[in-house]
């Protein structure tokens, strides 16, 4: 199997998929710990549905590069979710459900009223569950992914202390002079960027897994924020690589295979954590 994988790595589209998968998994895991601890992890699912609606709009308008439509709309929705979630009349979980379901329904309605291809069900399935083939990643998408991923990683490293403060005690962070609202806005925007990047790989319905599972897996073993963040990143990258390799060798859907590996890793970490606690 290793020899077969080495042969596949000679093809550019396989290398593209591995690069994109590793970078997206790394970015998702870095922010996933914060979102899980703030109990806002479901924002990934909400924004992924918004991205689905944005893709439908881009398809109807026949925009050649749908990133020009999807990214701005998803970022705007992330900001609206943050603002709406702070409203006492509409709580955060209700705001996510309201925007995500509305965007999903609106997008599917547009794709039915203005079909852009004869295979509507195939287009919808590919968008929801990820590309069925790694051949769909182009060099332009890989370059965009690399640039945006490096930006996300750099922002996270530079703002690590502020993100840490806001994650554990937002009120204390405000009292100590940390711009908590700006940090929350930054987290929301970065999350939106990660969601858009992950659409082609795992699809809108599976994106939350990239955010949630590595963080939860790392929390079964470690306790400090730094250790959990580093472990989450390592587990996410390894799971993504194994999932992509298994998808290539077994000819299975990329997104579903990666998520299946992350679920397996979670149960392994759960067992390891129980063993460490007993000792």
Image: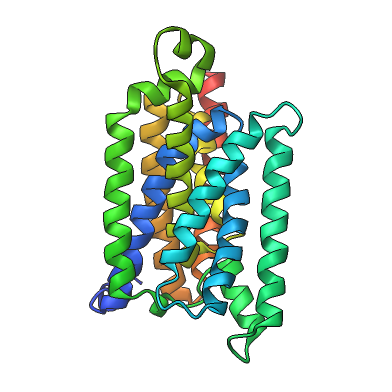
Residue at x 73% of width, y 26% of height: 88
Residue at x 62% of width, y 74% of height: 125
Residue 64 drawn at (x, y percent): 41, 78
Q: Is residue 260 above or below residue 183?
A: below
Can you see residue 30? yes
Q: Is residue 74 above or below residue 114?
A: above
Which residue is nearer to you in this view: 70 or 241?
70
Which residue is nearer to you in this view: 118 or 178?
178
Left or right placement of residue 192 versus residue 85 in this view: left
* Residue lying farthest to the bottom in this orientation: 118
Residue 86 drawn at (x, y percent): 64, 28
Residue at x 72% of width, y 47% of height: 97
- What is the number of callouts on the image? 0
Residue at x 53% of width, y 34% of height: 35
Left or right placement of residue 123 versus residue 96 in this view: left
Which residue is nearer to you in this view: 246 or 153?
153
Residue 276 drawn at (x, y percent): 50, 24
Residue 119, picture quadrant: bottom right
Q: Is residue 246 above or below residue 35?
A: below
């Amino acid at each position: 199997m290793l020899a077969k994988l080495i042969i596949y790595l000679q093809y550019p589209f396989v290398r593209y998929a591995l690069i994109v998968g590793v970078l997206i998994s790394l970015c998702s895991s870095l922010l996933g710990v914060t979102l899980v601890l703030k109990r806002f992890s479901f924002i990934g699912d909400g924004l992924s549905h918004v991205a689905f609606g944005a893709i439908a709009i881009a398809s109807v308008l026949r925009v050649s590069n749908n990133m020009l439509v999807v990214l701005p709309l998803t970022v705007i929705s992330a900001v609206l979710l943050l603002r709406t979630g702070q409203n006492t009349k509409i709580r955060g979980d209700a705001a996510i459900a309201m925007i995500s379901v509305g965007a999903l329904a609106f997008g599917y309605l547009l794709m039915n009223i203005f079909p852009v291809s004869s295979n509507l069900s195939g287009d919808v399935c590919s968008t929801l569950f990820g590309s069925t083939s790694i051949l769909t990643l182009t060099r332009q998408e890989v370059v965009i992914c690399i640039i945006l991923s490096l930006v996300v990683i750099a922002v996270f490293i530079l703002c690590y202390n502020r993100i840490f403060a806001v994650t554990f005690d937002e009120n204390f962070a405000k009292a100590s002079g940390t711009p908590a609202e700006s940090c929350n806005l930054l987290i929301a925007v970065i999350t939106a960027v990660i969601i858009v990047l992950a659409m082609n790989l795992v699809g809108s319905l599976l994106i939350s897994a990239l955010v949630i599972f590595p963080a939860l897996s790392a929390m079964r073993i470690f306790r400090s924020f730094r250790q959990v963040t580093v472990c989450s990143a390592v587990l996410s990258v390894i799971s993504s690589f194994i999932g992509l390799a298994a998808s290539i060798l077994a000819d299975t859907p990329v997104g579903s295979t990666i998520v299946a590996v992350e679920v397996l890793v979670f149960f392994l970490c759960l067992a390891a954590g129980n063993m460490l606690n007993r000792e």
